[in-house]
Image (cartoon, rainbow, N blue to C red):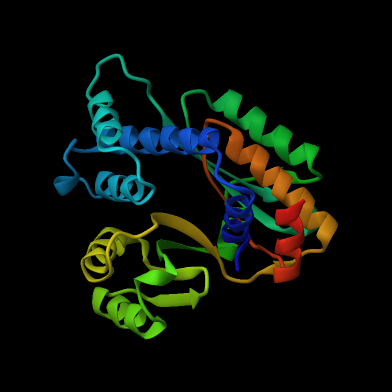
Amino acid sequence: MAGHSQFKNIMHKKGAADARRSKLFSKLAREITVAAKMGQPDPKFNSRLRLAVQGARAENMPKDNIERAIKKAQAADGDNFEEVRYEGYGPGGVAVIVESLTDNRNRTASAVRAAFTKHGGALGETGSVSFMFDRVGEITFAAKVGSDDKVMEAAIEAGADDVQSSEDGHIVTCAFEATGEVAEALTAALGEPEGVKIVWKPQNLVPVDDDKGATLLKLIAQLEDDDDVQNVFSNFELSDEQIAKLAAA
């Protein structure tokens, strides 16, 4: 399991705090607003906005919040955010990609660099690690939506590329350009997904020991706690035993 998914797994086992959900909704709203500004404020005619709305719904974001974020994009005095991607290496030489939406590049770059430095990592140039990842769409479902065969059949019909099923649920991947269409087809076949997003999927995973794993999780937690950071991806791998130990810590 890739580092990002394992981090989410550990955070889930620790319990979902209201503050964490509130921060998630703020980041989803920012993505919706930016997407609406970049095209028409109607998801039917704006593929990025459609994907952002799908992702927000999958996280149970209230409809009023979604509509408010879209309307904010039409406000003349609204904030202007730009997309900035940071890349670098964390403890153990694992690759880390940080996606941000910021209205102050200097502030965000300083915060990201400080997080890497604090946890024994190093920030690199854009492109320094992204070649080790594939840009894909990821749609996740709870295990209860159906058997592995049922989900696989639905994924094939929807035009997905791959399915990974486990007791924790089903992860469907597809070409990132087709994420919206695949998510809609899967929703019709299986019900509402737990997540719909574009991710950086590592081509190979790097095993890490307990100490480096714990430090990496602290690095990712600090990055994700930053309001300007939308997503963090990494290629580290932890064993089930390590996950259980870190989740209990």
66 and 119: which one is in front?
66
- Please state the horizontal and vertical placement of residue 139, each as a whole percent of the image: 38, 63
Residue at left offset 33%, top offset 34%: 34
State which quarter of the image contains the N terminus.
bottom right
Q: Is residue 199 left or right of residue 94?
A: left
Quarter of the rendering containing residue 236: bottom right
- Please state the horizontal and vertical placement of residue 183, each as a whole percent of the image: 29, 62
245 and 55: which one is in front?
245
Q: Is residue 25 left or right of residue 63?
A: right
In this orientation, does residue 225 appear?
yes
Total marks shown come to 0
Placement of 111 over or under 214, stated as above or below: above
218 and 92: which one is in front?
218
Residue at left offset 24%, top offset 79%: 157
Q: Residue furthest top?
A: 77
Residue at left offset 78%, top offset 64%: 208
Q: Residue furthest bottom?
A: 149
- Please state the horizontal and vertical placement of residue 117, each as a whole percent of the image: 78, 38
Residue at left offset 25%, top offset 37%: 63
Quarter of the rendering containing residue 154: bottom left
In this orientation, does residue 124 appear?
no
- Please state the horizontal and vertical placement of residue 64, each as a whole percent of the image: 25, 32
Q: Residue furthest right?
A: 211
Quarter of the rendering containing residue 213: bottom right
